[in-house]
């Protein structure tokens, strides 16, 4: 098969419809391995040609340092997919982490990408030994060490920790892996200075991959007592279920597919960023130029029309054509984590916008003409209303 056939060319609506029609049970799983790979481009094409006919969907990163995959596989083809992986020396016996909560719609297409690294970690790998990792711990051992008072550290980004985390874990404030690891290094240096003994630390992340780098880095920094949750939260959840262990992880696990999160326990550990009531419903502001990631309860979702604020709601409720015109020339800002760092700031903005809205009838005077009608709805065709040209 020629390389240009080895990618998906369909839009998301068609893909979603196709998945709806398909109707066959799927299993969402993830795996990774740090392993030296050569001929990565050719391997990418071979894997695409083999996995696409099996109905594999998902996101796979390949690099010279290994593979990192999040996929959904038709349950009937799991055996064939396993055999395909095991047929390759580099991927033989690579452990799978199976998602516990799965509606079979986690991914819409198959994307296999060649990357420089399988995780964007911002670390200079050449400066330390990435194979000198911490002790891999199973769920039962992780629980026991927590009971013994080890320091538990969440190696995920701030927005991932929000809706679920281990009881009493240290949650870094950073929104990047690099930032989080610097924060953790500082914390551990402080702890070490405060006591004579080296503190025992337990790291965890979504699927275990980030802890491989984090533990190797911390060991390179001179910390020796480093353990890590093997298989991450995803496999912890499976082990807890399989062996009837108590879950010390509370709430939901943030994942990187269409589901956004899977539930591990019924505990709700976060609050709605708009009203402050208990909620772990995570969503993006539906106004696409904003797209802010936020925790929003059902009542606030109804109140703000799935948006982060009255300002975004007003745009989101305009006729489609007017929305499109308004968005022209506006960049889609990366406001992803703003609300998470400062929910009080978001609530203040909502209060101010509500007041201004009550006073002026709009938060976007630029889109109304003097008669108070929508310019485009008023028969001005596809032209941008003069008042919103910049
Ligand atoms: Zn709310
Ligand atoms: Zn918004």
Image (cartoon, rainbow, N blue to C red):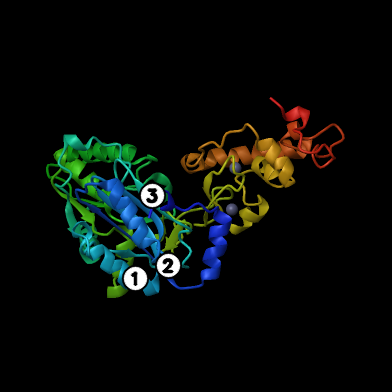
Residues 3 and 142: in front is 3
Q: Is residue 42 left or right of residue 223?
A: right
Q: Is mark 3 within 8 Å of ligand 2?
A: no
For numbered disc 2, what is the local secondary structure? loop
Image mark for residue 3: 3
On the image, the x and y values in percent for residue 296 come to 56, 53
Q: Earlier in the sequence, mark 1 or mark 3?
A: 3
Residue at the top extreme, as displayed: 390
- The picture places residue 223, in percent across and down from the top left corner, at 15, 42
Q: Residue at x 62, y 47 (%)?
A: 307
Can you say whether 306 is above or below 174 in the image? below
Residue at horizontal 38 percent and vertical 45 percent from the top? 157
**Dot in front, 1 or 3:** 3
Q: Is residue 204 above or below residue 287?
A: below
**200 sits to left or right of 324:** left
Q: Residue furthest right?
A: 371
Residue 334's x, y, as percent? 50, 37
Badge nearest the viewer, 3 or 2: 3
Which callout, 1 or 2, points to the residue nearer the camera?
1
Q: Quadrant of the C terminus?
A: top right
Asked if residue 246 shows in the view, the reply is no
Which of the numbered marks, if any, corresponds to residue 101? 2
Q: Position of residue 143 (x, y in %)?
A: 25, 63
Q: Quadrant of the N terminus?
A: bottom left
Q: Earlier in the sequence, mark 3 or mark 2?
A: 3
Mark with earlier residue (1, 2)? 1
């Amino acid at each position: 098969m020629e390389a240009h056939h080895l990618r998906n060319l369909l839009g998301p609506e068609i893909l979603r419809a196709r998945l709806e029609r398909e109707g066959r049970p799927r299993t969402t799983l993830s795996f990774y391995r740090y392993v030296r790979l050569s001929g990565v481009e050719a391997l990418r094409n071979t894997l695409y040609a083999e996995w696409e006919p099996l109905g594999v969907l998902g996101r796979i990163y390949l690099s010279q340092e290994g593979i990192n995959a999040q996929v959904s596989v038709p349950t009937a083809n799991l055996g064939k997919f396993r055999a395909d992986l095991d047929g390759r020396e580099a991927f033989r016996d690579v452990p799978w982490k199976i998602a516990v909560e799965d509606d079979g719609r986690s991914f819409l297409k198959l994307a296999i990408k060649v990357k420089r690294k399988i995780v964007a970690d911002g670390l200079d790998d050449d400066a330390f030994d990435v194979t000198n990792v911490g002790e891999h711990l199973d769920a039962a051992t992780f629980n026991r060490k927590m009971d013994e008072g080890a320091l538990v550290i969440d190696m995920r980004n701030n927005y991932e920790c929000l809706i679920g985390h281990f009881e009493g874990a240290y949650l870094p404030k950073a929104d990047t892996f690099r930032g989080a690891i610097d924060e953790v290094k500082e914390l551990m240096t402080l702890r070490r200075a405060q006591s004579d003994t080296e503190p025992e630390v337990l790291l965890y992340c979504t699927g275990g991959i980030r802890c491989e780098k984090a533990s190797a880095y911390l060991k390179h920094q001179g910390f020796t007592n480093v353990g890590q949750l093997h298989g991450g939260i995803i496999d912890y959840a499976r082990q807890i279920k399989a062996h009837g262990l108590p879950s010390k992880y509370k709430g939901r696990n943030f994942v990187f597919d269409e589901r956004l999160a899977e539930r591990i326990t019924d505990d709700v550990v976060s609050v709605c960023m708009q009203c402050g009531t208990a909620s772990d419903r995570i969503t993006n502001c539906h106004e696409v130029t904003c797209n802010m990631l936020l925790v929003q309860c059902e009542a606030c979702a109804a109140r703000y029309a799935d948006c982060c604020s009255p300002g975004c709601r007003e745009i989101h409720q305009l006729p489609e054509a007017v929305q499109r015109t308004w968005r022209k020339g506006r960049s889609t800002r990366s406001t992803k984590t703003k609300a998470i760092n400062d929910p009080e700031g978001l609530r203040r903005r909502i209060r101010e916008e509500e007041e201004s809205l009550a006073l002026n009838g709009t938060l976007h005077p630029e889109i109304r003409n003097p008669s108070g009608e929508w310019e485009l709805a008023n028969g001005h065709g596809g032209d941008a209303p003069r008042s919103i040209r910049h």
